[in-house]
Image (tube, rainbow, N blue to C red):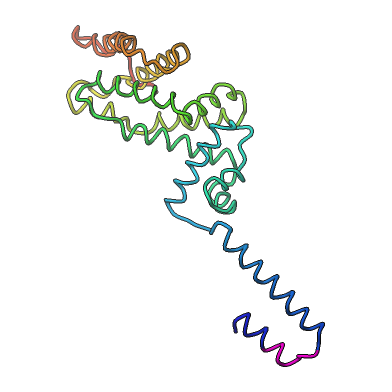
């Protein structure tokens, strides 16, 4: 029976009882108010679109407030979901931010453009890293990973990102092997780490200006060390880490 039908029925049965009429009116008002509240609250949602919304909201909140001041309530509000939706998948703030940064690192690797050469791929990776650092969100993550690095949870998050890099197949290596530029046992990860360090150093020094010429010079030096020894019949100077 609908609320309006119930109210009419009660009033028809006891038309002279003012107390009952008042009680029914108060109950009806409270019910309608609760109904409006439920409509205005975010619905409990699941699925990949919600995960993407929550992670994007977490990235934006992180870029504004940093890790220590990040609040799950603010992430839920920005994403338009209930807090329970977030806590069901990410019980702690550390797990949410770790999932965010690992997914960003995975996405960056998967979407790296194939330039046709090892040197070109490494240069494209450097450009992509610089573009990320120059974005509002990238600056926020960089600030967290430097200014808040001493925080135990931030240290654990950084280790998780590095573990992902160490254990995920490297697209640049796979392409290099397929082209015949690499055997597959060279430590390209070390070269990539050094290129990232150069990009970060340039970002700190020059901010938004990408020093492409400087990165090219570093790449030539690294590739000479990585591949140059092969022509003399010796083992590559840089080998995979155990």
Q: Position of residue 18 (x, y in %)?
A: 81, 84
Residue drawn at (50%, 45%) of the image: 54
Q: Is 196 on the left or on the right of 54, as rendered?
A: left
Count of numbered circles on the image: 0
Is residue 15 part of the magenta span, yes or no?
yes
Above or below 23: residue 42: above
Q: Position of residue 170 (x, y in %)?
A: 32, 30
Q: Is 198 on the left or on the right of 229, as rendered?
A: right
Q: Which image quadrant is residue 233 in?
A: top left
The magenta-colored residue range is 9-16
Residue drawn at (76%, 91%) of the image: 14
Q: Is 169 on the left or on the right of 96, as rendered?
A: left
Q: Looking at the image, which is closer to me, 61 or 92?
A: 61
Above or below 235: residue 21: below
Q: Which image quadrant is residue 181 in?
A: top left
Residue drawn at (60%, 84%) of the image: 1
Query: Which quarter of the rendered picture does the C terminus lie within?
Result: top left
């Amino acid at each position: 029976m609908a609320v309006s039908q119930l109210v009419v029925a009660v009033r028809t049965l006891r038309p002279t009882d003012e107390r009952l009429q008042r009680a029914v009116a108060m109950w009806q008002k409270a019910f309608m108010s609760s109904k409006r509240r439920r409509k205005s609250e975010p619905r409990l949602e699941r699925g990949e679109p919600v995960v993407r919304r929550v992670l994007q909201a977490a990235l934006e909140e992180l870029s504004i407030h940093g890790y220590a001041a990040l609040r799950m309530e603010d992430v839920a509000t920005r994403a338009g979901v209930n807090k329970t939706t977030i806590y069901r998948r990410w019980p702690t703030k550390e797990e949410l931010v770790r999932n965010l940064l690992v997914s960003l690192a995975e996405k960056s690797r998967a979407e790296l453009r194939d330039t046709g050469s090892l040197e070109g791929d490494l240069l494209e990776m450097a450009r992509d890293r610089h573009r990320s650092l120059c974005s509002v969100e990238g600056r926020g993550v960089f600030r967290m990973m430097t200014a808040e690095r001493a925080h135990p949870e931030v240290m654990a998050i950084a280790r998780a990102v590095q573990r992902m890099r160490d254990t995920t197949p490297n697209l640049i290596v796979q392409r290099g092997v397929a082209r015949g530029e690499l055997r597959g046992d060279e430590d390209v990860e070390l070269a990539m780490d050094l290129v990232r360090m150069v990009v970060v150093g340039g970002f700190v020094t020059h901010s938004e200006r990408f020093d492409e010429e400087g990165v090219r010079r570093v790449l030539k030096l690294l590739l000479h060390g990585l591949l140059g020894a092969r022509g003399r019949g010796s083992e590559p100077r840089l080998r995979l880490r155990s």
